[in-house]
Image: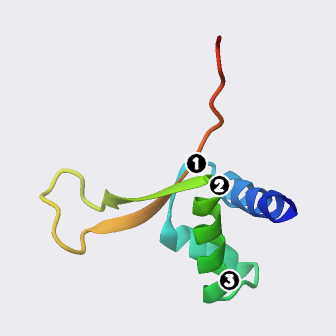
Amino acid sequence: MKERIKIKKLIDEVFRHYASDIITKEEFEKYFTTKGLSKEEIEELWVNAMAENLIEVGIQPKFPDEAMKSRDYDIVFEKKKKLIRLL
């Protein structure tokens, strides 16, 4: 449980820094590189965040109005929101 709390804190921190619910993998890596994490630690962080259901990983076209080619996309992370039960 402590590990999940640590991961959630780091995920909240990076999304708050960019003031967005969606950030690119490049932004994620840049942020944590400046915090002193290695590439391996950064990859482990986002994989664990995905496993803990804190983020979703997807792709987003770089040029939304054009046909998507093989490398014309960014890998993005979307912060998951808590669902509020209304019943």
Q: How far apart are marks 3 and 2 (CA)?
A: 18 Å
Labels 1 and 3: the sequence-earlier one: 1
Labels 3 and 2: the sequence-earlier one: 2
Measured as percent of width and height from the top left, residue 18 is found at 62, 56
- Counting every numbered tag in the picture gives 3
Q: Are marks 1 and 2 in contact (CB under 8 Å)?
A: yes
Please, is residue 73 above or below residue 15 in the view? below
Q: Mark 2 points at which residue?
A: 15
Q: Which amino acid does label 3 sit on?
A: Glu
Q: Residue 41 carries which label?
A: 3
Crowding around mark 2 (Cα neighbors within 10 Å: few <14, some 14 to 19, many 20+) is some
Which residue is rendered at x = 63% and y = 53% of the image? 54
Which residue is rendered at x = 71% and y = 80% of the image? 34
Secondary structure, mark 2, is: helix
In which image quadrant can residue 76 be found? bottom left
Q: Mark 1 points at which residue?
A: 20
Crowding around mark 1 (Cα neighbors within 10 Å: few <14, some 14 to 19, many 20+) is few
Q: Which mark is residue 42?
A: none
Q: Which amino acid does label 1 sit on?
A: Ser
In which image quadrant can residue 63 be found? bottom left
Secondary structure, mark 1, is: loop
